[in-house]
Amino acid sequence: MGQVTQALALREGGFAKGPRPQVPGDLHAHLELREIELPEPGEGQVLVEVILSPVNPSDFFYLQGAYGQPRQQGHAAGFEGCGRVIAAGGAAGEKLVGKRVAFLGSGSGSWATHAVAEAALCIPLSDAVRDVDGAALVVNPLTAVALVERGRAGGEAFILNAAASQLGRLMLGLARDEGLKPIAVIRRPGEEDALREAGATEVLVSSEPDFMAKAQAAIKALKPRVLLDAVGDQATADLFFTMPSGAAWVSYGKMSEEAPSLTQMGQFIFMGKTIEGFWLSRELLSAPPERSAKVIAQVQKRFASGAWSTRVAEEIPLDQALDRILPAYASGAGKVMIRP
Amino acid sequence: MGQVTQALALREGGFAKGPRPQVPGDLHAHLELREIELPEPGEGQVLVEVILSPVNPSDFFYLQGAYGQPRQQGHAAGFEGCGRVIAAGGAAGEKLVGKRVAFLGSGSGSWATHAVAEAALCIPLSDAVRDVDGAALVVNPLTAVALVERGRAGGEAFILNAAASQLGRLMLGLARDEGLKPIAVIRRPGEEDALREAGATEVLVSSEPDFMAKAQAAIKALKPRVLLDAVGDQATADLFFTMPSGAAWVSYGKMSEEAPSLTQMGQFIFMGKTIEGFWLSRELLSAPPERSAKVIAQVQKRFASGAWSTRVAEEIPLDQALDRILPAYASGAGKVMIRP
């Protein structure tokens, strides 16, 4: 018999029809707090006692049935976390037993007291890495590294919006450390200095009346050819159409409810512009494992040295999570964490 | 002193600010009929006495300053044509003198009694190729070949809209002859049978109420992953968002004035969809010359054998062109030709 765990379990399976908002209106409609029985960890899997698990934007898409993978009804939500390995299903996981690891839930997710994970994807954490950094060690940092690589492919400068997010800050620091010139776009004023300190060469505020004029000046000076976009609103489209020939709009998130209009289709033709998407799951699948391992080691080192640090809005016990996650998330103060 | 020629000369130079319509409201605003003096053909150039030159959609973009190359004020408009070589500027063109060729205007265009052309880009015409086919031998056929190549990159089936156009018909025949399954989209009913005969596996009419249902069925059955688009309207965007994972929207023209909305940005992320442009000038520049030569030979053979044929709406004398081009173009009956 498998481990019984307290979990935020998915009420529905599969995909929802049509698009869903970035943030759901009510978590109770999608999740319920209840006991579930995990499967026995198989060969190559381990059983993890969860210490802490983050709430990522991708979790919200997933639990609403709007992610690239179908929901598993009755299983726990939550993509990643950190925890202690307490059992192994086979020889491959034996050496992890007793260790604190960053993990990705396999089948059943991390928003639970226990989870099953693939041993090969568990990352043993050095003591210098805090729980909050270890819990968000996989999705955000690997996304940041991969997106900065994509940005670099267009030259020294690139634009990123939603730059005040956890992921945005990771990207700014990584880009600056690698000699790149990231142009940060934020929606509201207030964080300009903090983002310059985090690594931004320029900071543009999209709600300010002179936004497009300032954006044009920055684009003229720095010639960014990649736009890393987690917003997907009309301002993003307008920015894209202001960029030079060969510019790529890389969508990796959709925080806005707007459906942006392509006001200058001719730029695809005559200026060689493109729109594409970025999804970490696909990138990881296509990335060679040695490259992922190298990136993960690099990321852990950055956290251990303090170069990177996860800002936490709130840590919420599992049994209060369904009521408290959305308000904490809305505060925008940092990552929301679940501590079972 | 260079050859004096009667020409439809550009009133303005450079680019227009902002987007321009597919078809200009009035040609007199952009062109005037007058004598201009051509430069002496240089080394590697020839002087051509123009027989016939077509009106292409790209000509309308160019003369409005909305093409990918700046307008040359005071020079003739018109990208291509057929004519007889009457002089050569150097040894390279000597062997062409006296020959009937398809040509691209170099510096000054083909809407004139005479034009200067690069000898290396002149295509001697076999007697079996009619003037009307030779006049449109370069832009449309090379575009068709390159776009069908792009379509094939997504698998056996692809979608093309504006399928009743000259270019659309060329693509349908080429695709069918190569064992592909093109899905033709047209805006108004009436040409379904003709397009099936031309090579379409399916014909969809976007103005019909069951368009999306039929499109979904065809997409489910044939799984097209490339959408070759000369329209750029909301129906095109809706079609794109109905296509399977990995679908590419390839824009090569903009017949609609609509600015289509990206209603499902998540498909870029989770389904790996992309939007890109196609511009023949860029493709030709990046294509190896031997490939272009091979394609041109293939195209001429298709015209000579009657497999391809240019439909002509009207042949208009140069001195009546400014008044008669737009009404003839609006008839949609085929290619409008200028006979100086």
Image: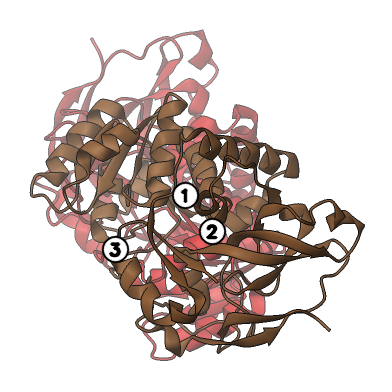
Chain colours: A red, B brown
Residues at marks 1 and 3, CA–CA distance in whole angstroms? 32 Å
Q: Quadrant of the C terminus of chain B?
A: bottom right
In-front residue for pair A210/B88: B88
In-front residue for pair B142/B245: B142
Relative to B255, residue A8 above or below: above
Going by the picture, which residue comes out furthest to the right?
A: B91
Q: Tell me which chain the residue with mark 1 is part of.
A: A
Give left or right: position of A305 versus A208.
right
Which of the 4 image quarters holds residue A33? top left
Comparing marks 1 and 3, which lies closer to the viewer?
A: 3
Vertically, is A211 above or below A267? Answer: below
Tell me which chain the residue with mark 2 is part of. Answer: A
- Could you tell me which chain the residue with mark 3 belongs to? B
For disc 1, the marked residue is A140
Label 2 crowd bin: few (<14), some (14–19), many (20+), radius 10 Å: many
- Residue ID for mark 2: A170
> How busy is the neighbourhood of tag 3: few (under 14 within 10 Å), some, or many (20 plus)?
many
For label 3, the SS is loop
Q: Are marks 2 and 1 in contact (CB under 8 Å)?
A: yes
